[in-house]
Image (tube, helix red, strand yellow):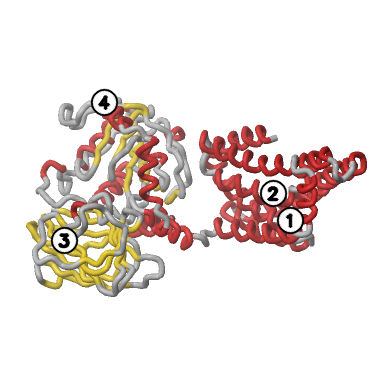
Amino acid sequence: MALSFIILTTIFLTALATFSLLAEVIRVSTYYALVLLGAGFLTEKRFRRYLFAALGALFYSNWGMVAVLIAMLSGIAALEMGRIIAAHIQQFGATIQNEASASFGRESLLTAFIVGLTLGFVWVPCAGPALAFALTLIREEPGAYSVFLLSAYVIGAAIPLLLIGYGGQYAVKTVRSFSRYTDTVKRIAGLLLILTAFGIHYHFFEKVQLWVLDSVPLASLEERLQGRWVPMDAFDAILGEKTPRTQAPIVRTPALPKITRAPEFQGLGPWHNSQPFTLASLKGKVVLVDFWTYSCINCIRTLPHIQGYFEKFKDTPFVLIGIHSPEFAFEKLEKNVADAITRHGLTYPTAQDNNFETWRAFANRYWPAKYLIDADGYIRYTHFGEGAYEETDEAIQSLLMEIGVQTEGSEGTEGNESNEGRREQTPETYLGERSWPALGNGSRTPTDEETLYEAREEMELHKYYLVGEWQMRDQERQVLLSPEGEIRMKFLGSEINLVLGLEEGAKSIEADIEVDGELAKTITIDMNDLFNLFTGEYGEHEMILRIHGAGVAGYAFTFGS
């Protein structure tokens, strides 16, 4: 049974990863199954069970009322079948136990062993929620990892049953004493299942998710595991097959090299502006994959050009997909990404890559990064960072010409300066462990202890300074603990931006920005986002951000020239 459970569930999860529409239907059906299981455990009255079946069927409302009606009738039928089957199974187990007791005696070791073997039938009311949770939690992880999780679940479930089976007299007494609480356990489990299903489906847990992501140090753990499991030469392998653009510039020529076959999209969701699709389904079309994240100023600067490609080539066999791979924990929330998409006016398909599965499949390392794929599924052109907009435009035209599609000229050179033409500027600086040497008044080694920082009379170029009581959290951000505090920075460039956010419980907070001794502006920090602090003449500038309230978190500086 354990082996069949692992095999069948693994096949099921693999199917989800392959067929996008099926995955969405099964996702909703999984939540509906939780509601039905919960209703069966919560109440014995049919009317109440049917009511929960009707409420859960609303999960299918995206497919119309006919789908809701079919789901409701199917749910009611499943409840009735489950009730009948469960009753027969439990009766079968109880009959075997009673016959064993009559034949071998209640105190017999053999009786205790038989009780352990048949405990699964009595255990059905408690096993149902566990099985449902196991299926729900791993359905997003098809492949070897899901086999590992299922195996761990089966072993964990088998060990206590085996111990009880050999526990003899003590096991029999334990089962008897536990039986008096069976109804209570069933009702509590049923209620939790129903609340969980509705909470997940209707996104009631977003605040809880944000609190967990911000409070638990997952970011550094993810980076360490990613570095351990993903070989560093994966990206180099792609570059090794690539003809350098500096040696073979593309100017309206179809002779783009075949770098490598493009990998399939993996682990994407939620989706925005589109239903889910796979790369395999786009065969015969030119595909541009753009990796970005909404708090990255370099990504934000490219978005108008990316949208421009979509508008220009939307009537051709061209597909553009934005892969949103979060740099910070708060960028994983669906609502935050949706707001950013609306704010920047993006209308092309965008999918969230919260676990970096597609990022790793492409062996990507940068934000932003573009991968252009031809009609046969080969990566033919890449660009990392800003710039090269005209070159990318011409590369798209080149691949469209290969399949017989003629297009208009490129979008022009205005605003399409390359990275080589930029002036020197202060590099991107993180307010965490990654850029710790850039903290001008910090200790020699990174610390997550609460620290009182004092202002320095002079600031060094390319370094930032904290004033007030601060604490580094999750190795990725500095959090202000005192009622007043400052972040100071001496930078080279014409623009400075800072990713800011609020910790759990903090309200909207005002902050004043001084540049070169003069008040530049006042901002309101009321969400996790990228804030522009100053845009002006190119040169060296001293910036002071005076924050009037505890709970503000600083993540990373970015600059422009």
For the residue marked with disc 4, what is the amino acid?
Gly
Say which mark, if any, is on residue 40. Answer: 1
First in residue order: circle 3 vs circle 4 = 4
First in residue order: circle 3 vs circle 2 = 2
- Rounded to the nearest angstrom, the CA distance separating label 3 from label 1 is 61 Å
Badge 4 local density, few (<14 within 10 Å), some, or many (20+)? Answer: few
Identify the residue under disc 2.
128
- Rounded to the nearest angstrom, the CA distance separating label 1 from label 2 is 10 Å
In the rendered image, residue 552, in percent from the top left (x then y), is placed at 31, 67
First in residue order: circle 4 vs circle 2 = 2
- In the image, residue 1 sits, relative to residue 522, either above or below, namely above
First in residue order: circle 1 vs circle 2 = 1
Mark 1–mark 2 CB contact (< 8 Å): yes
For the residue marked with disc 1, what is the amino acid?
Gly
Q: Which residue occupies 27% across, 73% down?
A: 510
Dot 3: element:
strand
Direction from residue 426 to residue 431 in the image, left or right: right
